[in-house]
Amino acid sequence: MTDHELLGLRARAANGDQDAVDQLVELAGERGDMDELRRLADGGSTDAVDQLVELASERGDTEELRRLAQGGSRDAADVLAELAEEQDDDSK
């Protein structure tokens, strides 16, 4: 996708085009673009939040998971709890 196409997609998303939002979430997830996903999540995309949780979990990014959990993501809180349990098990 060219920069011009990406800008057009972002403009469509900003105007409420859900298909454009979905495409942006998918592209950002494929690229691992946390900034784009954060922007989309801040705009209300629950799919972007889900993708952020997945990427943060894969990367072991507890800071991002905490941020998402504090923002209300139950999935992020669950992943943090699982990570804490794993650390407890490893320390025994």
Image: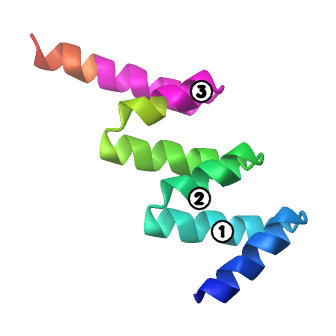
Cβ–Cβ under 8 Å for marks 3 and 1? no
Mark nearer the N terminus (3 vs 2): 2
Which range is magenta? 66-84
Q: Residue at x 34, y 47 (%)?
A: 58
Placement of the N terminus among the 4 image quadrants = bottom right
* Dot 3 and dot 2 residues touching (CB under 8 Å): no
Label 3 to label 2: alpha-carbon separation: 21 Å
Judged from the image, the secondary structure of the residue bearing numbered disc 2 is helix
Above or below: residue 72 compared with residue 31 = above
Instruction: State the count of labels.
Output: 3
Residue 24: mark: 1
**CB under 8 Å between callouts 2 and 1?**
yes
Seen at 77% across and 48% down, the residue is: 43
Residue found at the far right of this picture: 15
Residue at the spot 66% in from the left edge and 79% down from the top edge? 6
Residue 22 visible to an observer of this rendering: yes
Q: Is residue 66 found left or right of 21 in the rendered image?
A: left
Residue 70 spot, x, y in % from top left: 59, 22
Q: Which residue is mark 2?
A: 36
Image color mode? rainbow
Q: Secondary structure at mark 1?
A: helix
Label disc, if present, on residue 74 of the rendered structure: 3
